[in-house]
Image (spheres, grey):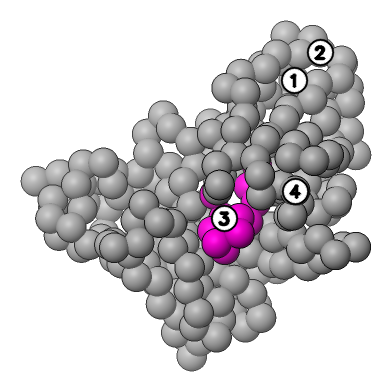
Amino acid sequence: SSELTQDPAVSVALGQTVRITCQGDSLRSYYASWYQQKPGQAPVLVIYGKNNRPSGIPDRFSGSSSGNTASLTITGAQAEDEADYYCNSRDSSGNHPFGGGTKLTVL
Amino acid sequence: QVQLQESGPGLVKPSETLSLTCTVSGGSISSYYWSWIRQPPGKGLEWIGYIYYSGSTNYNPSLKSRVTISVDTSKNQFSLKLSSVTAADTAVYYCARESSSWYRGYYYYYMDVWGKGTTVTVSS
């Protein structure tokens, strides 16, 4: 299956830790990548591979994977982290579908 | 620093073909995958397909019958054509560079450079 499933919405108190998950069969074979998208802007890569951050992404963002689930963790969430987050991965047919996205609200 | 810029008509009539080009600047189009992604108003990201610099392609099965992605290495550009468009194809269209690597037997792919996106409206 090429489907990646994410919770539609998650909230976190300012300064607390939040985990955003992505489930799919393809995640047993391929690592996910994670993208942050703020309103009116293009997506930005925040995590890729086992747990790699592009230059400029704060170290409060981290990634992990277990079985068919990939997770994006924000440790000490900031107001500027409020955004939509999407996971992406390759499936067995070579397709690269996105998850449905998770809207993160920082309270 | 690599930059991507989408270009093409912002308005396409129903049943016609949507054509967009992505120009790569600040780097070579070689050795990467080049992808198209779209986002309908108020909805999530949808992967359309990719082309490897050598010309091999892969398309979203739900769009495969209508999509063609091509590359022109001499111009450092790649293009998207989507035929027989309807209002459901109205979206912001993004191009992106996709890299690949592996770690302990697991391959991974990631879109590390994105264009700013271009809005395409399908309407008569």
Depth check, front residue: A20 or A61: A20
In the rendered image, the residue lying farthest to the left is B124
Mark closer to the observer (3, 1) = 3
Above-or-below relation of A2 to A12: below
Kindly report the distance in space between the C-alpha atoms of the residues bearing marks 3 and 1: 30 Å
Element type where label 2 sits in the image: loop
Whether residue A57 is in magenta: the answer is no
Residue type of the residue flagged with mark 4: Arg
- Residue A25 lies left or right of residue B56; in this view the side is right
Q: Which residue lies furthest to the bottom in this view?
A: B74
Chain of the residue under the numbered disc 4 shown in the image = A
Residue tagged 3: A96
Q: Which of marks 1 and 2 is nearer the N terminus?
A: 2
- Name the residue tied to disc 1: A79
Q: Distance between the residues labelled 2 and 4?
A: 33 Å
Is any part of residue B23 visible from this angle?
no
Which one is in front in this view, the residue at disc 2 or the one at disc 3? 3
Comes first in the chain, label 2 or label 3: 2
* Disc 1 + disc 2, Cβ < 8 Å: yes
On the rendered structure, is B98 left or right of A76?
left
Q: Which chain carries label 2?
A: A
Decide: few, some or many residues near mark 2? Use Cα within 10 Å; few <14, some 14-19, many ≥20: some
Who's the residue at 27% across and 53% down the image? Answer: B10
Give the side of residue A52 with respect to residue A96, left or right: right
Mark 2 touching mark 3, by CB under 8 A? no
Q: In this figure, which residue is indicated by the disc labeled 4?
A: A28
Residue B64: image location, x then y, percent: 35, 61
Please identify the dominant SS of the magenta region. loop
